[in-house]
Structures are given as C-alpha cells and as structure tokens.
Amino acid sequence: MSEGIAKKEEKPRKFQAIRGTRDLLPPETALWNRVEQTAHEVFATFGFGETRTPIFEQADLFARAVGGETDIVSKEMYTFVDRLEKLPDPPTLGDYGAFIEQAEKLMATEELPAVPGNRLAIERMKRIWDQGNVLGTAGESPIEKVDSAVLEELYKMVVLKDSMELGQSISLRPEATASICRAYIEHGMQQLSQPVKLYYMGPMFRRERPQKGRYRQFYQIGAEVLGGSDAPAIDAEVIEMVMTFFDRLELQGVQLDINSIGDRNCRPKYVELLRAELLKVKDKLGPDSQRRIETNPLRVLDSKLESEQGIIATLPRIADHLCEECAAHYAAVKHQLEMRGVIYRENWRLVRGLDYYMRTTFEITAQGLGSQNAVCGGGRYDGLVELLGGPPTKGIGFAIGEDRLILSLQESTSSLSASGKAPAQQGRDVYIAWMGERAHATAIRAAKDLRKAGFSVELPPVEQKFGKALGQADKLGAKYALILGDNEVSEGLWTLKTLADGSQQKLTEPDLLTFLKREKAKADPSLRSG
Ligand code: ATP
Ligand code: MG
C-alpha cells in the first residue's frame, strides 16, 4: 500500500490566511481596482510616473532610512537571512585557497555580505594562506608550509560559529520611500530633468497588532518628488494632488492637517526646549511618554492618552521656534495651498518622529475609521537621499493607506445605499442560455463577439433547461438572457430577454450588438461619444 492510502484516515489540515493578512475578494476587489485606476489617472495628470520596486530589500536600507529607533525597524519588520549556498563546505586541508577565492568573488557581487566582519575574517585567512604559499619552496607543496592548524581554527571560529554573515539580511518592505530613494540613486536619476516625480502602489509589511484598519500586510499608494528645489509650491502641489484624488473618489469627511517641524537648524533647539519642559512635568506623564522624553520627545506630542492632553496643551509650540527660513517656507506653503483652494487645518502637534523629516508635514483623516482614521501621511525629507549615499537631494512625498481608504469609501457607500442610492452592481451583461449542440457552437461564437465588444458574458459550460438557465441568470444579476435553441439558430433570429421586466424580443445577430451597445450607452453617458 502506498503511503497516501495509509494516511487516508487523517483529516487533512485546514489552512488559514496568516494573522494580520487577508484575502481581498470580489466584488470588493472591483472597488480596489477603481481606486487604483483613479490614482493612475489623477497622478498622471500631475506628471507622475509609476515605479514598481521589489517587495524585499536589504534590511539595512530600512534600518538606515526609517531609523533603528523607530517601532517599525526595532520590532515590526519581517527580516530573514537569505542563506548563501555557494560557499564550499568546510574546506578539507588544501582547498582553503578555493574557499577564500570564492568568498572574495561572492563578496564583490554582494552575495556574501561585504560587512566588516566578513572582510576581516577572509583577510585573516588569506594572510595565513599567502604566507604559507610564499614559504613554500619549489617542488614542495605550499600546503605543508601553511599553518593548517591555525587556518582550520580560524575557519571554525569565523565560519562555523556564525560569526561570519553567510547571507544577506533581508526585510519585507515596511514602506516604500526608502526603496524609491534607493532606486533614484541606483539608476542615476539625478541626471534626469529635476524634479523626478514618481508614484507607487502595493503591499507593505509591518508586524503590528492587527485590528480594524491595521494589518500586517497592508497596501499603500504613495508618491515622491525628488530633486530640484524645495519651492513651497512643490509641497502645495503634492498635497493638492492627494486632495484631488480623494475628491475624485468622493471620500467623505476628509480633513487635512499640516505643520512645519523645522530643519536641522532650528529643530534640535526646539527638541531640547521641549525635553526640558517635559522633564518638569515628568511625574504627570505615562510610562510611554516618560520614556520618549529621552528617546524622542517630539513623539510625546502624538500621545492620545486622555490624562496627558492637558499637560501637552501647555508645552512650547514649534511654530514659535522655527528659524527664519523655515518660518518663511511654512508661510509660503500655506499661501500656495490657499491659491489652490486646498482647505487645511494647522496642527502643531503633528510630528514625524524620524530625523530626516523636515519642514512640511501633513496628515489626512477620513470618516468611518474609528481610531485608525489616518488615511495619508506625508512630509518633506530633504536629507534622505544623501543619508542613503546619494547626492544632496530635496524630497517630499506621502503614503496613503489603501486599506483604510477603501474601508472609509465602503462606510460611506453603505450609508448612501441606505438612503436610496444603490451601490454599483457587479453582474453580467448577458447570460447565454443555450440548448443543443448546434446552439452551443453558436453560443461560443456569440460569447466571443460580445466579449470583444466589451460586454460581460456568462456562458454555461454544460447544457441546461431554459428554466434553470434563466434562474441562474437572475442569481448572477445578469441584465439580459440570450436564448439560443435550435429554432433561433436555424432562423437566424435570436431571442433576447430583458430580465428586469421579463420582456422579450427577436433580433438578428448584428441588431443584437447594436441594441446592446445603445442600451449600454444610455446607462453610461460617458460612452456615448465613443
Ligand atoms: P498610524 O499612525 O496609523 O500607525 P503611521 O504613521 O504608522 O500610521 P505611515 O507610516 O505614515 O503611517 O503610513 C502612511 C499610511 O499608511 C497611514 O496613514 C495609514 O493609512 C497606512 N498604514 C500604516 N500602517 C498600517 C497598517 N498596519 N495597516 C493598514 N494601514 C496602515
Ligand atoms: Mg504606525
């Protein structure tokens, strides 16, 4: 008996999507597509081009860009070692040369991480190996002169005991700004006409506590403007673009908050002042805020703790401590927003805890999301490209939480439908009810032609009685049933039943297409001109 049969008794294991991840299914995915399509359209009108960067990158990229002290990097990243398979196995006496050579080659292509520890280990082995080779005299195997015991010891120490990093440390991306900046540098985009305007959409990964509007795999739609100047009009236009996008989607209860957090010049002084003031009231703060006095005082301003609100209201505000340039920039951004008719609220407590953020920061909230109501966060990050080894480069961008955006849209559509407006039905245009072999062949051809003309067609794979077929058509929410039996096929006159009112008509094949196209144009006026 084969193993498969022997195990038959065991109940097969049921699999589930991993906690914090979820399946997006129809009909909901139609809304996701509409949102994404709208982003493509709106962002293109602002001159942004789509970028698709890898879903995993070197862990160091995020550690550097997002910051080792942030929650994202310190506890939320999915990081693993991509183990290298190509290094020769424990070298037996004699092939250390090959081992060293290959290790060097792999380090040059970054397959073996070119970290100082690895470099040092290989250099030490090489030194001993080379010494042995020099000592070797003609006719004598160099091996005999190599202190093989030392080499072996060294090998065991650095390679086997894992003090060498045999593979790259890789992370699933928790956000995309770092990747976009990496790509900007890697592809020499500073040579292009500046600024370079890029956008992206796709999954991000953070190991957070899952709840409504917070997932471990979630989706962001974002954009970045890199290079060129830091003209306030750029900040304003980026914000205008997000607001236009939300407006096009008819997102409800949109609220834009803005702030300026200064720059390297003025922020450190403000942070020190804030820290000093916080120390005076330390006893009245909760443990999180107490810790942040040391690590990141700005984050205290973020606190949602009821008991801390009164104290926070009395703290010094950054707006009063901006340097002249930052104050002027902030005033100009606000003016530029007004010129664009973008309504904003100033929120002095809106901060980004990361060092590279500077000047303009903004956040957009929407309705129906409970406490996870931020649908978009963004800001200026002029130092980031340089921090990643590129030239000094201005930068500003935002990231929209697509999951939350969709949740909010769904909330408002369901309230709309409650007040009488039906949500878009996801059904078929035409259900083809066929009976008989000849009719089947005609049905296949009809389906092909109708689909080519852009209609959604359901063609049942097996023959069924007309009554049953019409029932199916109803269930699928089809608008029409095309009835094809022997009579219809031989007469060349097809029966089309309008399911909403049960009316029937006989049409020739070309008339059918004309009729359906006309009806579709009536339902969707935008198609009429085309
Ligand atoms: P939050 O304060 O809600 O944790 P954040 O500051 O961590 O947000 P950003 O890193 O600025 O968020 O990301 C931008 C947007 O991405 C957020 O405004 C939010 O809409 C969305 N987002 C962030 N984390 C998640 C998540 N775990 N699940 C779903 N959406 C998320
Ligand atoms: Mg977060």
Image: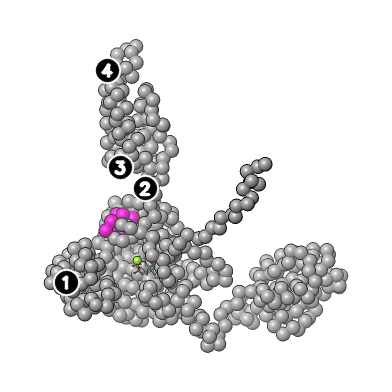
Numbered label attached to residue 115: 3
Q: Which residue is mark 4?
A: 135
Give the distance between the C-alpha atoms of the residues marked 3 and 4, in whole angstroms. Answer: 30 Å
Nearest to viewer (mark 2 / mark 4):
2
Sequence-wise, which precedes: disc 3 or disc 4? 3
Give the residue type at disc 3: Val
**Circle 1 sits in a helix, a strand or a loop, which is it?**
helix
The N terminus sits in image quarter: top right
Residue type at numbered disc 1: Asp
Q: Secondary structure at mark 4?
A: helix
N-terminal of the pair, mark 2 or mark 4, is 4
Neighbour tally class for label 2: few under 14, some 14-19, many 20 plus, Cα within 10 Å: some
Which of disc 1 and disc 2 is earlier in sequence?
Answer: 2
Image marks 2 and 1: residues in contact by CB distance under 8 Å: no
**Location of residue 239 (image quadrant):** bottom left
Quarter holding ligand 1: bottom left
Mark 4 is on which residue type?
Leu
Disc 1: CA contacts within 10 A as few (<14), some (14-19) or many (>=20)? few
Q: Which mark is residue 283?
A: 1
Could you tell me if residue 437 is visible in this image? Answer: yes
The residue under label 2 is: 169
Please give the range of residues in magenta.
62-69
Dot 3 or dot 2, earlier in sequence: 3
Determine whether the beta carbon of the residue marked 3 sits less than 8 angstroms from the nearest atom of ligand 1.
no
Q: Amino acid at mark 2?
A: Ser
Which image quadrant: the C terminus?
bottom right
**Between discs 1 and 4, the one toward the N terminus:** 4
How packed mark 4 is, by other alpha carbons closer than 10 Å (few <14, some 14-19, many 20 or more), is some
- Foreground mark, 2 or 1, reads 1
Q: Is label 3 in a helix, a strand or a loop? A: loop
The answer to whether the residues at label 3 and label 2 have Cβ atoms under 8 Å apart is no
